[in-house]
Image (tube, grey):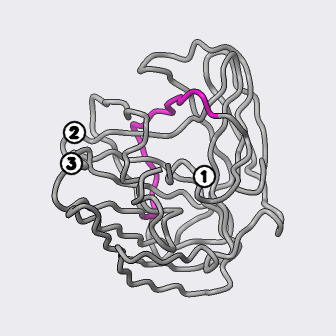
């Protein structure tokens, strides 16, 4: 794991500065990031998609897609032969499935941050989408914006209450500066967020952002070789590899 991925507090949401192992798809049109009004965000109650592999249609057969959280899996649905899947009703995590947000706080000599949290009792969870068919792995909702030169990933995040989080974190590693900005208005239930990362991670300053919103013109990209449905901790999520 890259040292930078041990960033304090909000690393569960902030961008992975290693860039991950999956190359996001190139779209013929840039992605549209739809940000709901901060004054009236809405919880997500269902979710569906269509899996692709290596830029082509899914050919891995029928199987399942599981919502995998740090404390275990939450729900499983059918993966059809054409790669489509649907969670008609997203599950409500139990109290045991949730983690106190403030308990995620870590410290690092390489980082400084400024955070505002409206409710310190906030409990949360985040999920990966684990696919099992002829092979197994993760699926991730990606889009690439050639004009903005960014990669955008969709994130599904659960909160047990309405809450506002803002955080700006600056970290310096090997003379390179990473500025991670988080600005989200959570409602009780499942929230859709977007993780925006520059395509060029080698510049002297790298700016990443997590905000409310959904990704259109994106693709559900299959990433093989995941080994388990269940995440051992929030640091095992796809944003922290």
- Classify residue 99 as left or right of residue 17: right
Image quadrant in which you'd find residue 54: top left
Q: Which residue is mark 3?
A: 148
Image quadrant in which you'd find residue 65: top right
Question: Which residue lies at the image location 41% right of the left edge and 61% below the top edge?
Answer: 35
C-alpha distance separating marks 3 and 1: 29 Å
The question of residue 75 being in magenta is answered with: no
Question: Which residue lies at the image location 59% right of the left edge and 73% below the top edge?
Answer: 104
- Residue 62 x/y as whole percent: 72, 17
User: Mark 2 or mark 1: which comes first in sequence?
Assistant: 2
174 and 26: which one is in front? 174
C-alpha distance separating marks 2 and 1: 29 Å
Which callout, 2 or 1, points to the residue nearer the camera? 1
Q: Secondary structure at mark 1?
A: helix
Q: Secondary structure at mark 2?
A: loop
Q: Secondary structure at mark 3?
A: loop
How many C-alpha atoms fall within 10 Å of the one at disc 1: few (<14), some, or many (≥20)?
some
Position of residue 44 relative to residue 228, above or below, is below
Q: Which mark is residue 236?
A: 1
Q: Which residue is mark 2?
A: 146
- Residue 143 x/y as whole percent: 38, 39
23 and 159: which one is in front? 23
Q: Which mark is residue 215?
A: none
How many C-alpha atoms fall within 10 Å of the one at disc 3: few (<14), some, or many (≥20)?
few
130 and 154: which one is in front? 130
State if disc 3 and disc 2 touch (CB < 8 Å). yes
The prevailing secondary structure element of the residues shown in magenta is strand
Question: Which residue lies at the image location 47% right of the left edge and 63% below the top edge?
Answer: 6
Region rendered in magenta: 211-226
User: Mark 3 or mark 1: which comes first in sequence?
Assistant: 3
């Amino acid at each position: 794991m890259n040292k930078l991925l041990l960033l304090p507090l909000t690393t569960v949401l902030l961008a992975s500065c290693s860039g991950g192992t999956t190359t996001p798809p190139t779209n013929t049109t840039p992605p549209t990031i739809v940000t709901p009004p901060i004054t009236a965000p809405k919880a997500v109650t269902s979710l569906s998609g269509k899996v692709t592999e290596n830029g082509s249609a899914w050919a891995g057969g029928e199987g399942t897609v599981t919502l995998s959280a740090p404390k275990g899996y939450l729900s499983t649905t059918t993966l059809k032969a054409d790669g489509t899947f649907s969670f008609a009703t997203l599950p409500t995590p139990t109290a045991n499935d949730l983690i106190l947000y403030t308990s995620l706080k870590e410290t690092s000599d390489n980082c400084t941050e400024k955070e505002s949290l409206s409710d310190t009792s906030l409990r949360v969870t985040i999920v990966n989408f684990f696919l099992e068919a002829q092979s197994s792995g993760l699926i991730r909702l990606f889009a690439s914006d050639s004009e903005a030169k960014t990669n955008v990933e969709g994130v599904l995040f659960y909160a047990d209450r309405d809450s506002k989080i803002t955080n700006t974190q600056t970290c310096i590693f090997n003379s390179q500066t990473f500025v991670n900005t988080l600005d989200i208005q959570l409602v009780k239930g499942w929230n859709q967020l977007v993780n925006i990362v520059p395509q060029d991670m080698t510049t002297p300053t790298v700016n990443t952002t997590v905000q409310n919103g959904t990704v259109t013109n994106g693709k559900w990209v299959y990433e093989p070789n995941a080994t388990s449905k269940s995440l051992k901790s929030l640091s095992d999520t796809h944003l922290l590899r």
